[in-house]
Amino acid sequence: MPSRIRRDSGGAVRYGAPHGRVFVELAVMELEQRSRAEKERPRRARAAVLPSYPRRRPSSPKDRVMLYHVVESPVGPLLLRSDGTALCAIEFLDEPFVAPTHWGHAPQAFSPWTSALASYFDGGCPSFDGPLSMKGTEFQQRVWRELRRIPYGVTVSYGELARRLGDPKAVRAVGMANGRNPIPIIVPCHRVIGADGSLIGYGGGLQRKQALLRLEGALLPER
């Protein structure tokens, strides 16, 4: 016989099977709630495991602050660059400079450095003690720190600089780090010369190295 379907006073559906008077009672609302809970569980779990973060726009060169200023000097125009908090570079210019469009020309940001450079080229011995931002390896940083310890008007050889760093065999590595110095003059790599007194090399050219050493009295003036 077909089962009979009836609903009791609580709203539950009863399926009645007449044989043996066996009744299976199903609470429809409870089943629906369980079904919804099962469907929601994966979503809640994902939300708990994977929290949402605000989307970040990829950075571009325009997002990074770069300030610059060009100053005249006896060894030619100098390009000064800053990240807004510290001096990043000094470059010797051999041709007219055109700044990238996202750079900002800010002479006032370099006033401590331009004043110190002016004093230096007037024959003074200023202290370049402003903040510097020099990117390099740990070894390069050690070399650059040692360069700043070389006094005004004094020269040392590459071999001597390597000995001061505790590795007399690192002459070649010292020379390479010297050549990668991003802030010449202030970090005086021009004061490092060959063991025989020869000038060897300089990123700004040997004429500039010669001129800087003569300015400091480390070389005899030309006759």
Image (cartoon, rainbow, N blue to C red):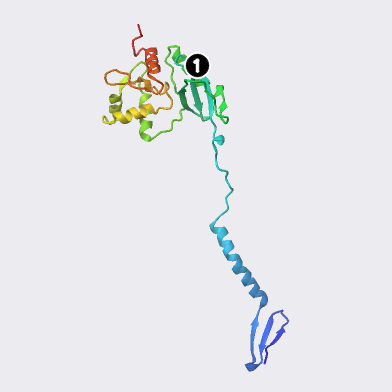
Q: Position of residue 64 (x, y in %)?
A: 54, 34
Task: Say above or below: 34 vs 15.
Answer: above
* Label 1: element kind: loop
Residue neighbourhood size for the residue with mark 1, other residues' Cα within 10 Å, grouped as few (<14), some (14–19), many (≥20): few
Q: Is residue 217 above or below residue 113?
A: above
Residue carrying label 1: 72
Query: How many marks are shown on the rendered structure?
Result: 1
The amino acid type found where label 1 is placed reads Glu
Residue plotted at (50% across, 26% down):
81
Residue drawn at the location 37% of the way across and 20% of the way down: 190
Residue 173 in percent (x, y) is at 32, 31
Camera-side residue of 147 and 223: 223
In percent of width and height, residue 52 lies at 58, 53
Which quadrant would residue 153 be assigned to in this image?
top left
Residue 51 found in image quarter: bottom right
In this rendering, position of residue 130 left or right of residue 14: left
Q: Residue furthest right?
A: 9
Q: Position of residue 47 (x, y in %)?
A: 57, 58
Q: Residue at x 56, y 58 (%)?
A: 48
Q: Name the outermost residue toward the front.
A: 95
Residue 29 in which image quadrant = bottom right
Give the answer, above or below, for where 201 lies relative to 122. Answer: below
Quarter of the N terminus within the rendering: bottom right
Image quadrant occupied by the C terminus: top left
